Image (tube, rainbow, N blue to C red):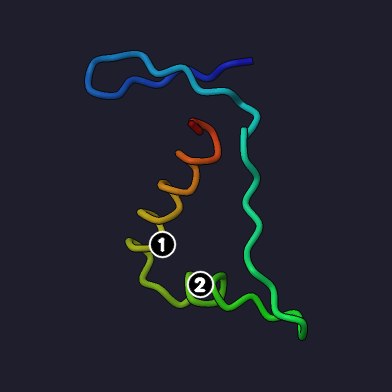
């Protein structure tokens, strides 16, 4: 039920099921401008933002 990972010598218990689900804004025509913006970023920046989104999904509040 829980995944364990070590961060700076401490044990962090993280649920395998997200607390919040990510849904990007969609225009009436079906475009997702934020998702498109993320897709056009450099790989390292996408990774950083993805880790932040994951943290919020699984560790909120």
Q: Position of residue 27 (x, y in %)?
A: 70, 79
The crowding category of the residue bearing disc 1, from other C-alpha atoms within 10 Å (few below 14, some 14 to 19, many at least 20), is some
Q: Is residue 26 above or below residue 20?
A: below
Q: Give the residue at x 61% y 26%.
A: 16
Cα–Cα span, label 2 and label 1: 8 Å
- Count of numbered circles on the image: 2
Q: Is residue 34 above or below residue 28?
A: above
Q: Specify the quadrant that holds the N terminus.
A: top right
Q: Give the residue at x 62% y 34%.
A: 18
Q: Residue furthest bottom?
A: 29
- Which residue is under mark 1? 46
Q: Secondary structure at mark 2?
A: helix
Q: Give the residue at x 40% y 21%.
A: 5
Q: Is residue 45 above or below residue 27?
A: above
Q: Is residue 51 left or right of residue 9?
A: right
Q: Position of residue 46 (x, y in %)?
A: 41, 62
Q: Is residue 47 left or right of residue 28?
A: left
Q: Position of residue 57 (x, y in %)?
A: 55, 40
- Which residue is under mark 2? 39
Q: Position of residue 7 (x, y in %)?
A: 29, 24
Q: Secondary structure at mark 1?
A: helix
Q: Nearer the viewer, residue 17 or 24?
A: 24
Q: Which mark is residue 36?
A: none
Q: Is residue 13 left or right of residue 16?
A: left
Which of pointers 2 and 1 lies earlier in the amino acid sequence?
2
The crowding category of the residue bearing disc 2, from other C-alpha atoms within 10 Å (few below 14, some 14 to 19, many at least 20), is few
Q: Residue furthest left?
A: 8
Q: Give the residue at x 75% y 80%.
A: 30
User: Do tag 2 and tag 1 residues touch (Cβ < 8 Å)?
Assistant: yes
Q: Nearer the viewer, residue 44 or 10?
A: 10
């Amino acid at each position: 039920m829980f995944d364990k990972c070590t961060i700076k010598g401490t044990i962090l218990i993280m649920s395998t099921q997200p607390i919040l689900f990510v849904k990007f804004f969609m225009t009436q025509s079906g475009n997702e401008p934020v998702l498109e913006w993320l897709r056009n970023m450099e790989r390292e920046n996408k990774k950083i933002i993805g880790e932040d989104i994951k943290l919020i999904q699984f560790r909120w509040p």
